[in-house]
Image: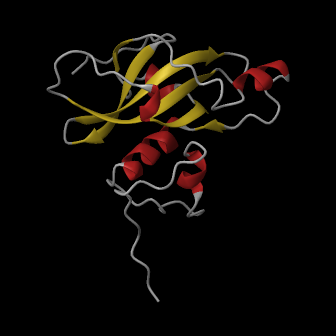
């Protein structure tokens, strides 16, 4: 699909490895240097395959989460850059502007590893309730979105 890069910029579309030569997709919306040097991203329901021709696209209707995340997976090339596109407008989906205006007080920064696990769970590749808080992934979904039909759950013992 794409070679690993350590440089990235707003507008870049990146892949989140899901296994089986498949990637979940996200877009870098901004570099939030004053918010612990993190990155503001949107994440989509689209799966790209390693053999795909051309750059995969993300439409606003594909979005499932908008988060401030750590940038380590981008810097290390774990989330490879697949191309670049016009920025998706997420102004109605996340309060990033008001967070910036207030010095990021109350901002939640998600680990890139947690976001990768979220995408794995979204696509049924790992349990939706794998964290201590079984509703953690529910809280990452955009408002109004329910759990995906592909979600699987840990076996419960009783």
Residue 136 position in % (x across, y down): 58, 55
Q: Is residue 152 above or below residue 27?
A: below
Residue 66 position in % (x across, y down): 57, 33
Which quadrant would residue 61 be assigned to in this image? top left
Q: Is residue 51 above or below residue 21?
A: above
- The residue at the point 34 percent across, 49 percent down is 123
Q: Is residue 27 left or right of residue 20?
A: right
Q: How many marks?
A: 0
Residue 59 position in % (x across, y down): 41, 25
Which quadrant would residue 47 be assigned to in this image? top left
**73 or 102, which lies in front?**
102
- The residue at the point 57 percent across, 45 percent down is 140
- The residue at the point 25 percent across, 18 percent down is 2
**49 or 146, which lies in front?**
146
- The residue at the point 46 percent across, 12 percent down is 8
Residue 155 position in % (x across, y down): 39, 75
Name the outermost residue toward the bottom.
158
Q: Is residue 27 above or below residue 68?
A: above
Which quadrant would residue 92 be assigned to in this image? top right
Q: Is residue 77 visible?
A: no
Q: Is residue 118 visible?
A: yes
| Quadrant for the N terminus in the image | top left
């Amino acid at each position: 699909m794409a070679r690993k890069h350590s440089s990235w910029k707003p507008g870049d579309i990146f892949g989140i490895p899901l296994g089986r030569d498949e990637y979940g997709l996200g877009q870098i919306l901004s570099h939030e240097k004053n918010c612990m040097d993190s990155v503001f991203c949107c994440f989509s329901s689209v799966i790209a395959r390693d053999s795909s021709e051309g750059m995969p696209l993300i439409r606003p209707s594909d979005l499932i989460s908008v988060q401030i995340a750590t940038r380590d997976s981008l810097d290390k090339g774990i989330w490879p850059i697949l191309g670049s596109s016009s920025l998706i407008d997420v102004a109605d989906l996340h309060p990033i502007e008001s967070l910036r205006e207030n010095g990021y007080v109350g901002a939640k920064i998600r680990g890139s590893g947690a976001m990768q696990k979220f995408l794995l769970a979204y696509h049924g590749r790992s349990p939706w309730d794998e964290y201590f808080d079984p509703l953690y992934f529910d809280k990452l979904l955009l408002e109004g979105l329910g759990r995906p039909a592909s979600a699987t759950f840990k076996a419960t013992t009783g």
